[in-house]
Every structure is written in C-alpha cells, then in structure tokens.
Image (cartoon, rainbow, N blue to C red):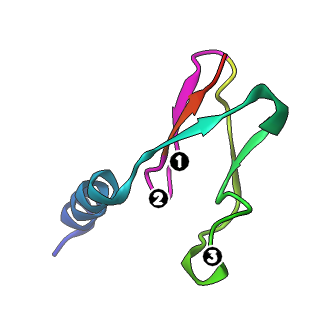
Amino acid sequence: MDIAEKKQGQERQNTKTSHVISVSPKELPLSCPRPEQTLWNQHPRVFIAIEKTGKAICPYCGNQFQLEN
C-alpha cells in the first residue's frame, strides 16, 4: 500500500467516525480534541479556525464543528 492509498483509507475512516459538534462563541478559540474527550482516544491538540465560515473539520479525526449563533 502506497502513501496515497493509506491517506485515502484514513479519510474514509474519518468520515465514518466523525460527527457534528456544536460550539458556542464562549468556547472559542476552538481546539480539538475537546476537553471532554477520553484521554486514550486523543490526537495532538490542534486549533481550528471556525470564526469566518461557522463550520470546520478537524484534520486529524474528521470531527465536524458548527458554530452556534
């Protein structure tokens, strides 16, 4: 399996396991993993820009975030 095939497999897995998480403006700046996630299931912390579009996807786990009004 080459790198491109491996990446495609990971992307398919991310879309299967991801879900939409509502985020209030009080919770900004947005980062993933979220504090309430279990420790064993965490990836490196990444800050995600959501302010402009109101939507964002974590590049590691594929979680989808929606900014509440």
The disc at residue 58 is 1
> Reading the chain from its start, which is encountered first: label 3 or label 1?
3
Report helix, strand or loop for mark 2. Answer: loop
* Stretch in magenta: 52-63
For the N terminus, the quadrant is bottom left
Relative to 69, 28 lies left or right: right
Amino acid at circle 2: Cys
User: In the rendered view, would you say 20 is above or below 42?
Assistant: above
Q: Which residue corresponds to the image point at 78% horizontal and 27% vertical from the top-left?
A: 25
Residue 38 tag number: 3
The relative height of residue 45 versus residue 26 in the rendered view (above or below) is below
Q: Which mark is residue 61?
A: 2
Q: Is residue 44 magenta?
A: no
Q: Residue at x 64, y 60 (%)?
A: 33
**Percent position of residue 10, x then y:** 30, 63
For the residues labelled 1 and 2, the Cα–Cα distance comes to 6 Å
Kind of residue at badge 1: Cys
* Tag 1 secondary structure: loop
